[in-house]
Amino acid sequence: MDLELKDKIVLITGAAGLKGSIGETILQSLVKEGAIPAVIDHNDRGYGYIEEIQANGVDGLFVKTDVTDVDQIEKAVQKVVQKYGRIDVVINNVGVNDGVGLDATAEEFIQSLKLNVVSYFLVAKYALPYLKETKGNILNVGSKVAYTGQGNTSGYAAAKGGVLSLTREWAVDLIKYGIRVNCLIIAECWTPSYDKWIKTMENGEEIMEGIKAKIPLENRMTTPQELADQVLFTISNRASHTTGQHIFADGGYTHLDRALLSS
């Protein structure tokens, strides 16, 4: 199926993570579809990723940006527009489950919100005039933590709850412009960061098996590629009548009857 993403200018945040991370996998998948990625991230890896992409004959842009800084976000969006003249899609993919719980300081809580939800607002705000011109769309990346809670992560949970609400609010706000807004919810996905976390645990392998056993479909974790595939379909015109949705690609982890797990 042709997703008709060729030459679309896709602004994506948080795509300069480690190889195999969700953001980096989305980035590479966009390139395979012929889209032109404009990456906004704080990590210098982004320079290398874009150099690799350009060496393979696809254009791209990296703008090193602290997404907790209002001015840096506005300038980053302007750099994208200066180079390409338009923005077709925004993917808000930043997310750090930073463990800012009730014992954190007010400043730490506020910083978590700045990173995990305020950045979404600011990127959408500054990209909006250009999305109106292209009748583009926005995809926010959320977390099941907003639905289930996790413990000791008040900042992240509050932020991701905000992302869910903003998705619906923006879908209402922007429907008159033909702009779709959706949210992909991530649950248990095997990433380099997850692997690193498991390896810090004394009984990491046992914990890992316990997590997988609680995922109804095939008792395995979601892969970054499965998430990237869902992202690409959702931002494409093949999903042209889908807006305001919270989309779960989680093997049934969040919603399905736990009775399935004993079968």
Image (cartoon, rainbow, N blue to C red):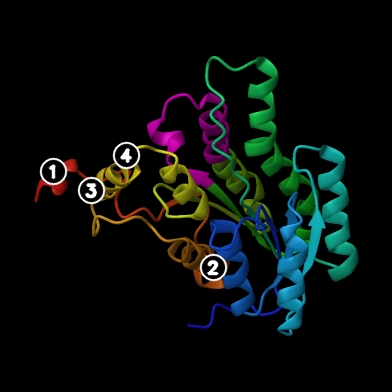
Near mark 1 (Cα within 10 A), the count class, few <14, some 14-19 or many ≥20, is few
Mark 3 residue element: helix
Can residue 150 be found in the magenta stretch? Answer: yes
Say which amino acid is labelled 1: Ala
In this picture, is 202 found above or below 78?
above
Near mark 3 (Cα within 10 A), the count class, few <14, some 14-19 or many ≥20, is some
Going 42% across and 53% down the picture, which residue do you hit?
189
Say the numbered circle drawn on residue 259.
Answer: 1
Q: What's the magenta region?
A: 142-165
Near mark 4 (Cα within 10 A), the count class, few <14, some 14-19 or many ≥20, is few
Mark 2 residue element: helix
Cα separation, mark 1 vs mark 2, equals 32 Å
Circle nearer the N terminus (1, 2): 2
Viewer-closest of 3 and 98? 98
Near mark 2 (Cα within 10 A), the count class, few <14, some 14-19 or many ≥20, is some
For disc 3, the marked residue is 213
Say the numbered circle drawn on residue 232.
Answer: 2
Going 71% across and 83% down the picture, which residue do you hit?
56
Q: Do the residues under discs 1 and 4 have CB atoms within 8 angstroms? A: no
Circle nearer the N terminus (3, 1): 3
Say which amino acid is labelled 3: Ala
Q: Which residue sits furthest right?
A: 82
For disc 4, the marked residue is 203
Mark 4 residue element: loop
Q: Main secondary structure of the magenta part?
A: helix
**Mark in front: 2 vs 4:** 4
Q: Which residue sits furthest front?
A: 202
Say which amino acid is labelled 2: Leu
Quarter occupied by residue 96: top right
Residue 191 position, x and y percent, is 48, 55
